[in-house]
Image (cartoon, grey):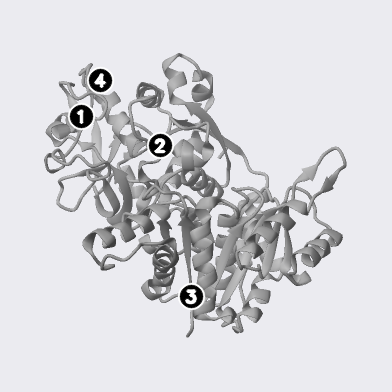
Amino acid sequence: MTTKYLIFTGGVVSSVGKGVTAAALGLTLKERGFQVAVQKIDPYINVDPGTMSPYQHGEVYVLDDGAETDLDLGHYERFIDIRLTRVSNFTAGQVYAEIIAKERHGDYLGGTIQVIPHITNEIKRRVKLVARATGAEIVLVEVGGTVGDIESQPFLEALRQLRNEVGRENVFFIHVTWLPYIGATGELKTKPTQHSVAALRSIGISPNMIIARSDYPVDNSLTDKIALFCDVEKEAVVPMVTTPVLYEVPLLLEQAGVADFIISRLKLAPRRTPDWQAWKQLVESVKQPRPKVQIALVGKYVELQDAYMSVREALKHAALAVGVEVEIAWVHASDLEKNRGWEIVQQADGILVPGGFGSRGIEGKILAARYAREKKAPYLGLCLGMQVMCIEFARNVLGHEDANSTEFDRSTSYPVIDLMLDQRAITDLGGTMRLGLYPCVFKEGSKTAAVYGVPQVEERHRHRFEFNNAYRQEFESAGVVFSGLSPDGRLVEVAELADHPYMIGCQFHPEFLSRPNRPHPLFVGFMKAAAERSQRV
């Protein structure tokens, strides 16, 4: 079967919701029996987001194969419930690095290297690779940024060429735009959408559908106007009003008939009738009033909540399963060091310390772990959150005042967190990282084993430093249970406190495998403990 391509472009402003739209549409197509795959193209020159500050681009989302990718891949996996691989995300940096490496190798026999055809051919190769690698019938491709961005031009040109190569009947362009609201006149404006479509058409791409995002209701006169001025069928102008429930977007697309319209234009026939019962129940559950449970999220990048996108969604999934509503109180770890923000931590029903890199705010995270341990407050530590939990225990229970991670203090006499011996000679950033899916075996009788209900799992990792095995016995003698280990027993994956209602730290990132209808066990256990502490469940 010929692969069909749905190409998503953005207009007017960035962060307009292309990723969620692509993810939601992917689900509507999957519900009709099609095998779908999704790809995000990022036009920035970085090779991947792995070394970028979370303030720049939100969280780094890690896949099974260790690829460090854009956070939109989290939307794809959560909505469509698929497991993606590194072919589903590439950047301008990767494209240019590939071409330059070939040129240095002599592959072009001394020829002049140009954007067309060399760069555009490499882009098309990577787009086509998705279908070959996954066997998908429909590939959804999201182009990052906005039409008119100078760095996007080679990608849009490549996709224009792709349409001609695979056949116009096999490519469908969806332009996602924003309708700004003018408060003085109380009206939505379509002119920016017209201009962005004009920019798209100037490079040879006419959108087949326009998704018009708005914070306000969009009446038919506006969609008719967009259809007229942008040369798009009236049925193909779809207003998409902001919804407070993220997971309602697939139902809104279904209600608007988007999937059926696209399928008919691509000359496909649905394999089955979509069954939305479970998804509707999910959305209805989210809308129902539930007892509130407050979780203090003690992080380093809390000014940009997208830096913890998957953690936030995993907490919501778990709260829904437990029958409560989570209220996340965002606490800057550095504030705790200055004796600010403690009232939020003290009022919270649970404390979550997520991952991160670098020394800023570390002492605040350690103070949060100490509070959770001493006050018996439910605590979930993710990656760095497990490491600060161990540092705190070493300092305040075992009495090693200068205990630390060698990431933050290379001269510490008690390096409870350290690089493994075989990592120390590697100098490239990322070279020492443990990335992707690794197995974890649970200790029978532990809280972690009880929460999971299975003896072994595989979880996604993204970290550089490990618990120092030289101190395992001392920790265990004082009440720490290393409830998750690598199959060879060499690496600590999970630590928990024996005499605590729920204080668990894991070296991996469980948030990446949480799904709306299948919340992650560690988050569910944490939320249950927090709900019990709040005395509302």
Q: Distance between the residues labelled 4 and 1?
A: 10 Å
Q: Name the residue under label 3.
A: 35
The amino acid at mark 3 is: Gln
Residue located at (27% from left, 44% from top): 430
Decide: is 71 above or below 238.
Answer: above
Depth check: give the residue in front, 164 or 141: 164
Residue located at (47% from left, 85% from top): 1
Depth check: give the residue in front, 378 or 130: 130
Q: Distance between the residues labelled 2 and 3?
A: 34 Å
> Viewer-nearest of labels 2 and 3?
3
Decide: is 341 above or below 492.
Answer: above
Q: Mark 1 points at which residue?
A: 416
> Viewer-nearest of labels 4 and 2?
2
Label located before the other in sequence (1 or 2): 2
How packed mark 3 is, by other alpha carbons closer than 10 Å (few <14, some 14-19, many 20 or more), is some
The amino acid at mark 4 is: Arg
Label located before the other in sequence (1 or 3): 3
Residue located at (44% from left, 45% from top): 523
Label located before the other in sequence (4 or 2): 2
Q: Mark 4 points at which residue?
A: 395
Q: Mark 2 points at which residue?
A: 354
